[in-house]
Image (cartoon, rainbow, N blue to C red):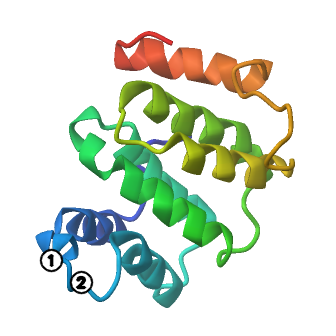
Amino acid sequence: MNEHAFPTNLASMIESILLDPAFDRDDARESRAEAILDLLTRLKVDWQNALDVFFHVLLDGSMKQSWQHVLESTWLALGKIKDFPASMIDYTIAVIYHCVQESDLVDGNLAWSITCTLKRVNYDSDYDPFQDAAVYEMMKHLSEKQGSRL
């Protein structure tokens, strides 16, 4: 996957939402995740372009404060954007669990909900991404690349 194949303007639009302090106010009309989903829907962005931008943020250690918002956006988008690329399921789960390992700001329950949806398993299933050889190898590679431990 080309890590920088996403449309630059989409990336800058999403990053501006992630960094906009207006979403931190109690009277904000919508969450960052809702604003990102609205943007993706309005621009008719496909999963590949959305994922390219999401991965760009989720693999940037300097943007840890935004990881939860990106996962919330992913969760909302799963219900709206059809045809999640099957070839990206394991990598997406690996990136999500890499973030869970790297930041206590990331909600493990949300990570699990996304994982269950992508893997099409029940929420109370015995599936374990750390026991899934393909996902685990990708997590290991991401950890080594990012200079962290799994």
Q: Are marks 1 and 2 in contact (CB under 8 Å)?
A: yes
Which residue does the image show at 35% across and 12% down from the upper left?
A: 147
Where on the picture, by quarter, is residue 27? bottom left
Label 2 amino acid? Ala
Q: What amino acid type should be assigned to the residue bearing mark 1?
A: Ala
User: In percent of the image, x 59 and y 70: which residue is there?
Assistant: 77
**Where does the image place residue 127, in percent across and percent down from the top left?**
82, 32
- Identity of the residue drawn at 38% across and 13% down: 148
Q: Residue 22 carries which label?
A: 1
**Figure quadrant of residue 19:** bottom left
User: Is 140 situated above or below 124?
Assistant: above
Residue 94 in percent (x, y) is at: 60, 32
Q: Name the residue under label 2.
A: 28
Q: Nearer the viewer, residue 111 or 139?
A: 111
For the residue pair 142 and 4, the one nearer the viewer reads as: 142
Q: Residue at x 86, y 47 (%)?
A: 121
Say if 87 sits above or below 25 in the image: above
* Mark 1 and mark 2: Cα distance apart in space: 7 Å
Disc 1 or disc 2, which is closer to the eye? 2
> Total of numbered circles in the picture?
2
Residue at the left extreme, as displayed:
21
Indicate left or right for 143 with 63 as reference.
Answer: right
Q: What element carries label 1?
A: helix
Res 142 label: none
Local crowd size for mark 2, using a 10 Å CA cut-off: few (<14), some (14–19), many (≥20): few
